[in-house]
Amino acid sequence: MDSLPTKFIRNLENFYFQGSKSPMRRFLFDSKAIKALKANTSSQSVPFPSKIEALTAFLCKRIAAASKFLTDVPKTLAITHVANLRPRVDPPLPQNIFGNLLWIPIAFYDPLDASMELPDLAIMLREVFARLTAENVKEIESESTLTTLNELFSVSTNEKIKIFRFTSWCNMGIYDVNYGWQKPVWVAHMGDLDAANIRSKHQFVFLESACKEGIELWIASDDEEIRVVEKDPEFLAYAKPNPSICK
């Protein structure tokens, strides 16, 4: 029988990586598109969704719509969104403290549930993050953390569940750091678009645009859903595919 660390490493690699390489896609949501999506995502429960909540809910909706065109529609879609634990512990930790102090909340939804609209998806996301209270974070610090993470990562082995992984690099001051050649003009994810073929599995990364008024979405996936989404008129009504960084 495999040891817990061995199972953990195997499940971790299966959760985040795949055997074949994936092309990288880049889209830009400008300030006008973000404002419209925030308005469309607003509800009584979440009257002021954040930019990332609105964009994530929008992506979840388009992925669900795209899934309906597949021959083998997944029973359940799951999304993970990396959460920064620094402000969630008691007492809160400084934002600049070094290390990967994070957790990976996970939310499940039915791709065939036509009643799930943008506000419902935003509420789902807000509720998942709301569970990361200081009290619950204390449990993460216990000796059972490795077991809990192993159970989370093992979800990816369930053939009835398809997982899409989100993370946001916004508001991290990336454009304010002098990396040795002065402050950057533009920050990209995982290199040049033509050269970037990576093994990340269904990964969505949000980055501030160079002008800091919009948000770039970088997608590492070559699944059928994504090929449908990138041609989806409703998606392209808000997302500009790989525009020039000079505009």
Image (spheres, rainbow, N blue to C red):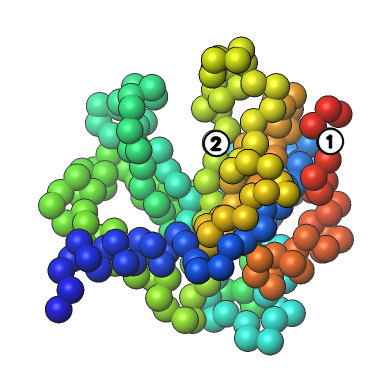
Badge 2 crowding class, 10 Å Cα cut-off, few under 14, some 14 to 19, many 20 or more, is some
Residue holding disc 1: 244
Q: Left or right of 67: which side holds 46?
A: left
Q: Is label 2 in a helix, a strand or a loop?
A: loop
On the question of residue 237 being in view, the answer is yes
Give me the residue at 76% from left, 41% from top: 29
The image quadrant of residue 86 is: top left
Badge 1 crowding class, 10 Å Cα cut-off, few under 14, some 14 to 19, many 20 or more, is few
Count numbered badges in the picture: 2
Residue holding disc 2: 169
Q: Left or right of 149: which side holds 159?
A: right
- Residue in front for this viewpoint, 76 or 172: 172
Which mark is first along the chain, 2 or 1?
2
- Residue in front for this viewpoint, 61 or 244: 244
Q: Which three-letter amino acid code belongs to the residue tagged 1?
A: Ser
Residue 120 spot, x, y in % from top left: 60, 59
Residue 98 spot, x, y in % from top left: 33, 27
With respect to residue 83, does 208 lie above or below? above
Q: Which three-letter amino acid code belongs to the residue tagged 2?
A: Trp
Q: Which mark is residue 227?
A: none
The image quadrant of residue 121 is: bottom right
In which quadrant is the N terminus drawn? Answer: bottom left
Give me the residue at 26% from left, 63% from top: 8
Give me the residue at 39% from left, 24% from top: 95
Q: Left or right of 184: which side holds 8?
A: left
Residue 61 spot, x, y in % from top left: 68, 62
